[in-house]
Image (cartoon, rainbow, N blue to C red):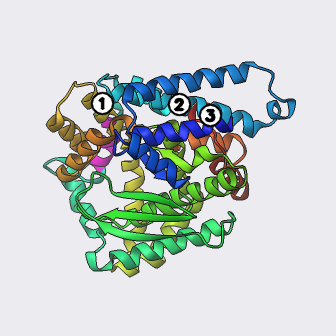
């Protein structure tokens, strides 16, 4: 298994030479990265080697493995993980060679999952409720944006608010999760990106978190980004994988993170669900009302009102998937996809155009955020990690973050 794992890492690095977005993180042997850059393996060769490794894995699974290994759940998960990650790699090679998959076929091949399809009527029912909340003339999205302007974090207060949100998320995480003493991350503010935030894991328990300031940042994004990118989201996920799988077990395959793979659904799903884990129930509104709203100079008496509206708007999250599905399947063009997002996802025009640029760059990756969150929630709650059992919820959450479980195994 270790030999296959090493070859898998080298194939991921080789594919990264053809796809700048593919290798999200790598902190394995530096010479492997140099080797990949120097040899620049052809796509056909990468595909051939991936298929050969899949054959080796299948043969290994069919032969008499040591009894202890067969009875070790983590070893079995590792085998399945390598199999699906290699299969996704091979699918990504086909895409880079020009093969075009439908939105659902692509997400199944890359992320081991397919998002449900919703009709326009599903979103319209939610929009009808918002119409009652924001009566008036003109497009609903404009009335909603007028409401939201009162909750924009001023540029000069963005970093203090974000740092305080990080502190709150970290404190809550450390009450339940043991992290290496030297873990940390730095924050940068950037522009001209298709995403709102990004965690670049560096290895050595370090991350670089970038926050995109192209568009106004609303107060809810402080906790969202601090949890999602930091604690207990991407930073904690990568730290725990490095500690428990790479360093403790010597599983080198986890020293590389291929973005277009099943691992991303686990990463994005846990990062989004982690917000609820860190701030269950009314804890978030209370924290924001007493800490973040005053720090941002916003009216703290409106915190509950803001989150009541956001809870309703959040029910439109799958509208983004529908826009991406139609766009990737060439049922609509970029302008039509943006218009669909404005109408059914209540995105401003600029935010909708930014989202379409995300579709261009990352395609069916969008399912990892909302479907991932829903799958993670159901999995953890099925194991007793409900909102009424916070300690159990944290324990199951940490256990999942520290394991190589696949999306199709979240049952």
Sequence-earlier tag: 3 or 1: 3
Q: Depth check: give the residue in front, 263 or 168.
A: 263
Q: Depth check: give the residue in front, 218 or 87.
A: 87
From the viewer's perspective, tell me whether residue 309 is left or right of residue 233.
Answer: left
Q: Where does label 3 land, which residue?
A: 4
Which residue occupies 48% across, 36% down? 11
Sequence-earlier tag: 3 or 2: 3
Neighbours of disc 2 within 10 Å: few (<14), some (14-19), many (20+): many
What's drawn in magenta, residue-wise?
A: 123-132
Q: Where does label 2 land, which residue?
A: 86
Q: Position of residue 222 (x, y in %)?
A: 41, 67
Q: Where does label 1 land, which residue?
A: 120
- On the image, which quarter does residue 18 sit in? top left
Viewer-side label of 2, 1: 2
* SS at mark 3 in the image: helix
Neighbours of disc 1 within 10 Å: few (<14), some (14-19), many (20+): few
């Amino acid at each position: 298994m270790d030999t296959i794992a090493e070859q898998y890492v080298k194939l991921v690095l080789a594919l990264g030479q053809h796809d700048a977005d593919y290798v999200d993180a790598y902190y394995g042997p530096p010479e492997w990265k140099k080797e990949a850059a120097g040899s620049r393996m052809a796509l056909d060769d990468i595909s051939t080697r991936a298929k050969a490794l899949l054959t080796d894995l299948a043969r290994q699974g069919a032969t008499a493995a040591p009894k202890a290994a067969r009875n070790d759940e983590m070893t079995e998960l590792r085998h399945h993980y390598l199999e699906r990650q290699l299969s996704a790699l091979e699918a990504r090679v086909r895409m880079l060679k020009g093969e075009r998959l439908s939105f659902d076929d692509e997400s199944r091949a890359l992320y081991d999952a397919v998002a449900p399809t919703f009709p326009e009527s599903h979103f319209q029912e939610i929009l009808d409720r918002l119409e009652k909340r924001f009566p008036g003339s003109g497009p609903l999205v404009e009335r909603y944006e007028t409401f939201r302007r009162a909750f924009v974090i001023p540029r000069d207060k963005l970093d203090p608010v974000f740092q305080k949100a990080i502190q709150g998320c970290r404190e809550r995480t450390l009450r339940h999760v043991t992290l290496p003493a030297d873990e940390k991350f730095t924050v940068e503010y950037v522009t001209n990106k298709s995403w709102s935030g990004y965690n670049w894991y560096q290895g050595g328990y370090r991350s670089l978190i970038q926050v995109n300031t192209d568009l106004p940042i609303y107060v809810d994004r402080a906790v969202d980004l601090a949890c999602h990118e930091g604690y207990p989201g991407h930073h904690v996920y990568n730290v725990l994988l490095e500690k428990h799988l790479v360093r403790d077990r010597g599983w080198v395959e986890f020293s590389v993170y291929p973005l277009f793979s099943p691992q991303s659904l686990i990463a994005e799903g846990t990062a989004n669900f982690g917000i609820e884990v860190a701030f269950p129930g009314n804890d978030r509104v209370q924290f924001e009302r007493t800490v973040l709203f005053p720090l941002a100079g916003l009216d703290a008496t409106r915190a509950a009102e803001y989150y009541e509206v956001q809870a309703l708007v959040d029910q439109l999250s799958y509208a983004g998937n529908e826009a991406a599905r139609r766009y990737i399947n060439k049922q609509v063009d970029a302008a039509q996809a943006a218009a669909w997002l404005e109408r059914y996802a209540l995105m401003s025009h600029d935010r909708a155009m930014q989202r379409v640029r995300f579709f261009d760059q990352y395609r069916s990756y969008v399912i990892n955020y909302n479907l991932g969150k829903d799958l993670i929630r159901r999995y953890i709650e099925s194991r007793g990690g409900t909102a009424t059992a916070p300690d159990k919820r944290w324990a199951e959450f940490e256990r999942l973050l520290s394991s190589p479980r696949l999306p199709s195994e979240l049952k």
